[in-house]
Amino acid sequence: MGGYLIRHLIIADDHPICVSALIAAVHAVDSSIQVRTAETLGEIQDLLATESFDALLLDLALKDCQGLANLAAVQAVAPRLPVLVVSGNAASNLPAKAAMLGARGFLNKTAPLAEMKSAIAVILEGGTWFPAREEQAESLTGRLSPAQLRVMAELAQGKSNKLIAYSLGLTEPTIKSHLSAIYRALGVHNRSQALLALRQGADEAA
């Protein structure tokens, strides 16, 4: 990314105040950066399908998908896109899990503007930005593997096993096996309970 190139960035968050703060931080880095916003995972996927971006600032609690399933879904379609996860709670293993899933950084929503600016600048320059200290308490999404999180991201969009299998390039029996493992990991018995458990976990992390 040369100095004369206009960079393009997505801010995915459904809280207007947070979006405004992040836009201010982005433009504090470089006023020429073009920002697109999204409130849902579907909107992110539509943008990625039609345009090229230099980074994504991703909230973990979107309207149509919750938790680290958002990150897993983005990584599935744009594995090289630098992602800075933005959350209201860094006092968990979320930063470590986000890093494991391919995020370049993890930023607390309560961070001051100067810290937001620094994190965004580092991500755009190819670096990483994670909290210096991380608690070890395991979140619900922390119990799932990257493959299981991708299945949950598809499930959150209301897709059938057949459509999930098609979307992820897997067989239906494989999807059923993943779902059984997800139910066991979350201590639930069906799709609705699994989605509810993940939403509740995302609420605690948002």
Image: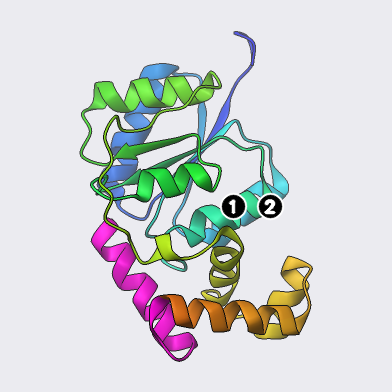
Disc number for residue 74: 1
Q: Is residue 67 visible?
A: yes
Give the residue furthest to the top: 3
Image quadrant assignment for residue 42: bottom right
What residue range appears in magenta?
Answer: 186-206
Q: Please tell me which residue is depicted at 32% across the width and 59% down the height of the picture.
A: 138
Can you say whether 201 is above or below 84 in the image?
below
- Tell me if label 2 and label 1 are in contact, CB under 8 Å: yes
Can residue 200 be found in the magenta stretch? Answer: yes
Name the spot of residue 49 as percent of width and height, x first.
71, 51
Q: Secondary structure at mark 1?
A: helix
Image quadrant assignment for residue 5: top right
Query: Marks 2 and 1, Cα distance to the nearest angstrom?
Result: 5 Å
Name the foreground residue: 116 vs 21.
Answer: 116
Give the residue furthest to the bottom: 189
Disc number for residue 148: none
Q: Amino acid at mark 2?
A: Val
Which residue position is annotated with label 2? 77
Q: Quadrant of the C terminus?
A: bottom left
Name the spot of residue 139 as percent of width and height, x first.
33, 61
Name the spot of residue 75 as percent of width and height, x first.
61, 49
Q: Please tell me which residue is depicted at 47% across the width and 27% down the height of the picture.
A: 128
Q: Secondary structure at mark 2?
A: helix
